[in-house]
Amino acid sequence: MNRILVTPRSLTSGGHPALDMLTRAGFEVVLSEPGKLPDEASLLHYVEGCVGWLAGVEPVSEKVIDAARDLKVISRNGVGVDNLPVNRLRERDICLCTADGANASGVAELAIALMFASLRHIYITSSGIKRGEWPRVQGNEFRDQVLGIIGCGAIGREVARLACALGCRVLGFDPMEPELGLPADRFSYASLDDIWRQSTMITLHCPPPRDGATLIGASQLEQMQPGTLIVNTARAGLVDECAVIDALDSGKLTAYATDVFNEEPPQSLALAGHPRVIATSHIGGFTRESVDRATEIAVMNILKVLKEKSSWR
């Protein structure tokens, strides 16, 4: 079989010119159901006979990998791999590739946009006007906020650069503490506890802890200043949703802005429908530019691996 499975929602809805490279190389491109996040049953159906897989954020079980008997490579159109059974891929000698940095600008810009929207209560005022009201909620300026960034990889680095340019003081946490080339009077690394205590805004750009625990729960929220806002464009599992709702109700958090949910679309609106929550539909990397970069990198990774593995027809 010479099939390549494509499952990212940004590609199954309307395709992409970069996928033509696979066709020209002699592969049959198989798209999962248009615009939908495929579940296990769907993946079991589509993955049969595929030698390559251009994957999105859909959860992939070991059962799916075991059923993919011909699979040689999974190429993500992003950087996260926590939705994949990495150990089973390693056992099967299936190569795993990521599109490092492809969506960094798109996600970083959305994170900054969500900060502005939260600081100025744009959702509350806009929805109020549409109801015929005239809400005027006093906001805060972006300049001189203390922004805590958890995870300083490609996305967190771009958020830090933008925030420093806009006049924020930025505290970063990353176990590797990469050199970001930012002015020392604007950026410094800090411990998580210092970030919880000192930040007026916190943005998440990291994978979940390896033990599966949340990064922000009741004890972390308790350390934060009243009126803190949190932005999450990374993973829903990083926060304890019930604790966040309690913090929003008490005023400990002034806003929670999120692009990610445990279920997408969310079945419960307890969090997404909260008046202090700004919710977007996993659009961080869903810009024309990010999709172009990520798709091209993901396709090239597939072709490179399959050539190395002599999987050409």
Image (spheres, grey):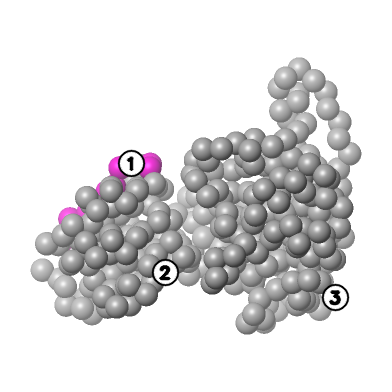
Membership of 208 in magenta stretch = no
| Residue at the disc numbered 1 | 34
Seen from the viewer's position, the closer of residues 153 and 48 is: 48
| Residue at the disc numbered 3 | 185
Amino acid at circle 3: Asp
Question: Residue shown at 33%/41% (left/top)?
Answer: 34
The mark found on residue 98 in the picture is 2
Question: Residue shown at 86%/47% (left/top)?
Answer: 140
Membership of 35 in magenta stretch = yes
Judged from the image, the secondary structure of the residue bearing numbered disc 3 is loop
Mark nearer the N terminus (2 vs 3): 2
| Mark 1 neighbour class, 10 Å CA radius: few under 14, some 14 to 19, many 20 or more | some
Amino acid at circle 1: Pro
Mark nearer the N terminus (3 vs 1): 1
| Mark 2 neighbour class, 10 Å CA radius: few under 14, some 14 to 19, many 20 or more | many
State how far apart marks 2 and 3 are (Cα): 34 Å
Residue 22 picture location, percent across and down: 23, 60
**Helix, strand or loop: magenta stretch:** loop
- Residue segment shown in magenta: 26-36
Judged from the image, the secondary structure of the residue bearing numbered disc 1 is loop
Judged from the image, the secondary structure of the residue bearing numbered disc 2 is loop
Q: Is residue 152 left or right of residue 131?
A: left
Q: Name the quadrant containing residue 99.
A: bottom left
State how far apart marks 2 and 1 are (Cα): 22 Å
Residue 156 picture location, percent across and down: 64, 67
Amino acid at circle 2: Thr
Image depth: mark 3 or mark 1 in front: 1
